[in-house]
Image (spheres, helix red, strand yellow):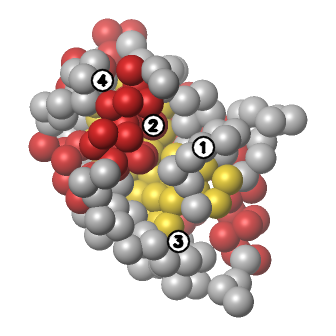
Amino acid sequence: MSLKDFIISKNIKRIRRNVRFHNFETAENIAILYCIQSKSDYEKIKEFTEELSQKGIDVNTLAYVVKPDDIGNIYFGQKNNNFFSEKHITKFGKIKETCIKDFINNKTDILINACIQNNFYTEYIFALSKAEFKVSGITGCKYSDLNINISENENSDFFTEQVMYYLNIIKQG
């Protein structure tokens, strides 16, 4: 077991989560966890967020910024959008930022992990979230209720198209 897996499994034991199926008909609010490696990553999620908002769904986002110095401060101060970097979570899983704790603990119907490649920070937040229904495109994600296979086309546009498709057509049985 890697150190990452040990830290996540140790902390996830304390989480009490009410698992419940949601789609776009039943969801009142959606949280999106994503990574920013370039300015275009933010723009793509912004479009996705607007599309969800047009459905009457309240959307909250949290972005892991890979290289904050390369991006600058253009994203800060935006409503329902928060950002963090590796300096906000220690390698041992101690969260230093209130917005991250709030994101994990908020009552959320659907949490979408829109990161294409996993890393400790986003996997940790995704695992600890108390969201009722979790969606991910990362192959073999242990903490997801719905895994969408994007292995043949690993890009964020394809992933968001698939999320829109599946959460529109899947109904609770």
Which marked residue is nearer to the observer: mark 1 or mark 3? Answer: 1
Residue under pointer 3: 54
The dot on residue 153 is none
- Kindly give the residue lying farthest to the right in the view shown: 152
Residue 59 image point, x, y percent: 40, 62
Callout 2: 10 Å neighbours few (<14), some, many (20+)?
Answer: many
Question: Which residue is pictured at 51% across the width and 50% down the height?
Answer: 143
Say which amino acid is labelled 3.
Answer: Gln
Pointer 1 and pointer 4: residues touching (CB < 8 Å)?
A: no
Instruction: Please report the residue visible at 24 percent of the width from the left and 54 percent of the height from the top.
Output: 14
* Labels 1 and 4: the sequence-earlier one: 4
Q: Is residue 117 depicted above or below 87 in this figure?
A: below
Marks 2 and 4 in Cβ contact (< 8 Å): no
Which residue is rendered at x = 32% and y = 10% of the image?
69
Q: CA distance from mark 1 to mark 3?
A: 29 Å
* Helix, strand or loop under label 1: loop
The numbered mark at residue 85 is: 4
Q: Quadrant of residue 9?
A: top left
